[in-house]
Image (spheres, helix red, strand yellow):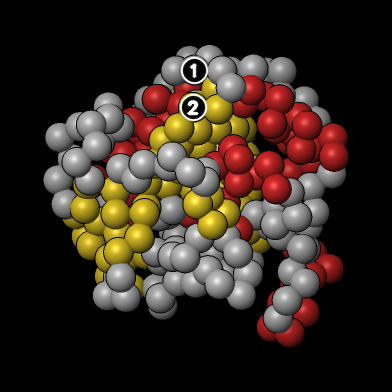
Amino acid sequence: MVRNLILTGGIGHPFADASAALAEILAAERIVSTITDDIEQGLADLGGFDMVTVYALRWRMLIGEKYSPHRDQWAFSLSDAGRQALAGFVDRGGGLVALHTAMVCFDDWPDWRRLLGAQWIWGRSAHPPFGPIEATPTEIAHPITAGTVPFALKDEVYGDLEMEPGVEPLIMGDAGAGSWPLVWARSVGRGRVFVDLLGHDRASLEQPTHRELICRGARWAAGGR
């Protein structure tokens, strides 16, 4: 059994419902999840977990008046203790799964990009409106995508991210405005990191091919522990 901590919460996405769906999907793989939207409290004690999943939209919200009504509840800067806990967890061999909006989180923490291999840059990064996406595996051989065929779903695809050198996309996504990396996997320290930029809602998570990719990615990430 793998013990997984899901860190969630934020605006513009049905995180409560989608996080519950994610936990159900992973439970079929004997991955038992604890869900919390209290990120600091969740990271305060990682001793009982094998894997951390960040499925949240938590950042400082410094730019954009449209975020004003949400700042008091959801604006967030990860503490030094939280940063050290999460980075240390991965460096020591813990698994990290980053879904969808995780790329936007922790915008004032440079090492978040080191962990994930990419990060959203305000003023440059963007995504087309929620809608149809064509997802296509690349030629890179990896157990997460072995045998995967192209598939379609409705979601958001994030583009123009700040990418770390050496990131090799396993899946590319096209929403009609160019092709951008969707899925990749990498080792950090003794740990493993699986990044999946899809996952706007329950329907995306439960699309059969995407669901299988999530399960494979989580199993691979947990394999570092």
The three-letter amino acid code for the residue at tag 2 is: Ser
The mark lying in front, picked from 2 and 1, is 2
In front here: 202 or 60? 60
Residue hosting label 2: 187
Percent of width and height locating residue 73: 79, 64
Above or below, 55 relative to 83: below
The spot of residue 151 in percent (x, y) is 19, 54
User: Left or right: where does residue 77 sit relative to residue 201?
Assistant: right
The local secondary structure at tag 2 comes to: strand
Give the number of the disc on residue 103: none
Residue placed most toward the observer, 194 or 36: 194
Q: Residues within 10 Å of mark 2 (few under 14, many from 20)?
A: some
> Residue, x 77% and y 72% (percent of image)?
62
Of the numbered discs 2 and 1, the one sitting upstream in the chain is 2
Residue 20 visible in the displayed image? no
Q: Which mark is residue 224?
A: 1
Secondary structure under tag 1 reads loop
Q: Is residue 211 left or right of residue 33?
A: left
Whole-percent x, y for residue 213 in the image = 31, 39
Compared to residue 180, the image places residue 84 above or below, namely above
Residue positioned 77% across, 25% down in the render = 45
What's the amino acid at mark 1?
Gly
- In the rendered image, which quarter is residue 128 located in? bottom left
Given contact means CB atoms under 8 Å apart, are the residues at marks 2 and 1 in contact? yes
Above or below, 169 relative to 31: below
Q: How many tags in the picture?
A: 2
Q: Position of residue 94 (x, y in %)?
A: 59, 22
Q: Residue at x 59, y 38 (%)?
A: 115
